[in-house]
Image: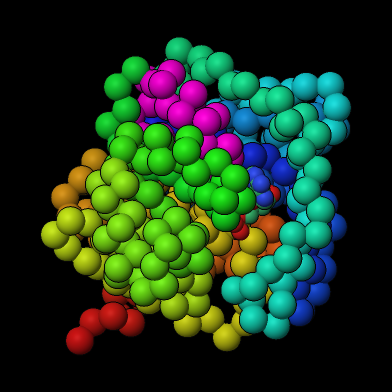
Amino acid sequence: MSDAIAVVGSVAFDTIETPTGRADEVLGGSATHFAIAASYFAPVHLVAVVGDDFPAAEREFLAARGIDLAGLEVRAGRTFRWSGRYHEDLNVRDTLKLELNVFADFQPHLRDATRQAPFVFLANIDPALQEGVLAQFTAPALVACDTMNHWIESTRGPLEALLPKIELLIVNDEEARLLSGETNIPRAARRILALGPKQVLVKRGEYGAILFSADSVFAVPAYPLEEVFDPTGAGDSFAGGVLGYLASSGDRSEAGLRRAIVYGSVLASYIVEDFGSRRFRTLSRDDIERRYRQFVALTEF
Ligand code: AMP
């Protein structure tokens, strides 16, 4: 039996423009992408808030993936909305609109079953809120966390207070640079480790990901796709694959973590094949295993 994972973050409707097309009000949010990806491996408790406009069909989709929605609060008002436009270089995106709506005064109080979860993912939200949530867990075995430019720039104090309580910080290269003040990624990682997390996992989009800890480095490429439709949620589903595999295997060794990072890369490579989280509507566990084997072949020499 896999250990449970709790995730706190956003559930949203996203409007996305990429060089290949556009999608309006598709199911998104950092916690959503993470939860769906992780649900292929382990039971997931989703802690988030939606408005009373959140459709029953979306709830049913999440529940059908085995995601526990007892912690998905429904408040009077509108669900969080985000809208973004990607450049030709898909690593660059502009946020066009951010409507917090019911998310604005989200103060999660975890249920007992959720507090017991050994794996915790603090998806991208205000670091003070991340810390408040973390304090509610009884004995988390592994805590991972994400953040973004906005929080690094506007709430550095609370973020630096949170980092020593984190085992695994998952950030992209731009965030790593901003957080550390270093351009070179290995140097940036070294500085971030000095802020407290045991390990830092830097996502580099189409260039893959690198895991740094005090005494080791591990790099994995991204799956070479000929067409990327929409990178939204790639980082969150990467994290979902990593924690999902760790929770399902119970293997916390360095080798187990390396395998988990390959699973994360597999999930990220699938979500970008369609807008929002649509690709997950048809993705099977067999698809995941097939691409995992392709990853092994890709990096064997
Ligand atoms: P990613 O592409 O992995 O950075 O994640 C994109 C997801 O994050 C989208 O589905 C958005 O709904 C969500 N998102 C964007 N901005 C924020 C924010 N400020 N707080 C929480 N979630 C956000």
Screen quadrant of the C terminus: bottom left
Image height of 155 relative to 88, above or below: above
Which residue is at a point 73% across and 65% down the rendered structure image?
Answer: 94
| Left or right relative to 251: residue 186 | right
Stretch of the chain drawn in magenta: 116-137
The residue furthest top is 112
Image height of 1 relative to 298, above or below: above
Quadrant of the image occupied by residue 120: top left
- Locate residue 210, reporting x and y percent: 33, 67
- Locate residue 176, reporting x and y percent: 43, 61
The residue furthest left is 215
Which residue is at a point 24% across and 67% down the rendered structure image?
Answer: 218
Which residue is at a point 44% across and 78% down the rendered structure image?
Answer: 207
Residue 27 in the magenta stretch? The answer is no
Screen quadrant of the N terminus: top left
- Coloring scheme used: rainbow
Give the camera-side residue of 80 and 156.
Answer: 156
- Locate residue 141, reporting x and y percent: 27, 32
- Locate residue 31, reporting x and y percent: 58, 42
Which residue is at a point 59% across and 45% down the rendered structure image?
Answer: 154
Q: Is residue 54 visible?
A: no
